[in-house]
Amino acid sequence: MKRRLVAGSTVLAVVVAGFLITSPEAVLDELARIAARPLRFGLVLLALAAVRPFLAWPTTLLAVAVGYGYGWPGVPFGLLLVTLTALPPYWLALVGRGDGEGRVARVGERVVSATGGTRSVAASRLLPAPSDAVSVAAGVAGVGTAPFLLGTALGELPWVVAGVAVGVSADRVAAGGLSGLDPALLVGMAAAGVLLLAGPLYRGYREQSAA
């Protein structure tokens, strides 16, 4: 039993170390070799989710990999990975904001106050902005952990479904999984994000102007 645990840990460490010195596209190639063993594949994806923020890789990579290895049933697991991988930059920004007296922090707090923590995070996730930038902005604005997680899950769900859809098709992954998303889908999600933010922000502006 111990030998199996050591062997499995060694394989996992080697794979993660390989990820650290390769590109996202190379990661997909490497994951294809591991996908035949679902449990090991899941452990590797968890490890990849843990280190992804420090490599500045797109979160969509995780969803594509999940789709390739598990197919459509993997959507919940993909959403879990994408949500968890957003925590490190959020926590770092939350700790680094101090007393929240900075100008950026004050602006962020006003936006969150007008739209709500969950809504602001979810809407921001729908925009075609870097996921880690949204996480950092939420931390700087002082969004609570629970609203952050819920907003991240809601906002990232369409991206996860789109990524899994790409990963389900081996041909699309081979052709470039990270660039296989439909531009119309990107525009639609961005429009939804803008609409979610526009109403509350406009009402907040009207109330501030009338005061």
Image: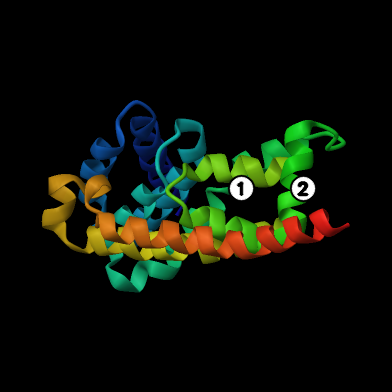
Residue 17, picture quadrant = top left
Q: Which mark is residue 131?
A: none
Q: Residue 68: in sight, yes or no?
A: no
Of the numbered discs 2 and 1, the one sitting upstream in the chain is 1
Q: Which mark is residue 109?
A: 2
Position of residue 124 in the picture relative to residue 142 (left or right)? left
Q: Residue at x 39, y 47 (%)?
A: 8
Secondary structure category for the residue under label 2 = helix
Q: In what quadrant of the picture does the N terminus appear?
A: bottom left
Q: Residue at x 77, y 47 (%)?
A: 109
Q: Residue at x 30, y 29 (%)?
A: 22
Q: Residue at x 72, y 40 (%)?
A: 140
Task: Give the number of the mark in front: 2 or 1.
Answer: 2
Position of residue 176 in the picture relative to residue 178 (left or right)? left
Residue 171, picture quadrant = bottom left
Image x and y of residue 103, in percent:
77, 32
Q: Amino acid at mark 2?
A: Glu
Image x and y of residue 82, in percent:
48, 54
The one nearer the camera, 35 or 166, is 166
Position of residue 94 in the picture relative to residue 85 (left or right)? right
Image x and y of residue 186, in percent:
34, 56
The one nearer the camera, 167 or 1, is 167
Residue furthest top in the image: 21
Residue bearing the label numbered 1: 87
The one nearer the camera, 164 or 34, is 164
Q: Residue 159: in sight, yes or no?
A: yes
Q: CA distance from mark 2 to mark 1?
A: 19 Å
Using the image, determine if residue 195 lies above or below residue 24: below
Q: Determine contact: label 2, label 1, CB under 8 Å.
A: no
Mark 2: give few (<14), some (14-19) or many (20+) Cα within 10 Å.
many
Q: Amino acid at mark 1?
A: Leu
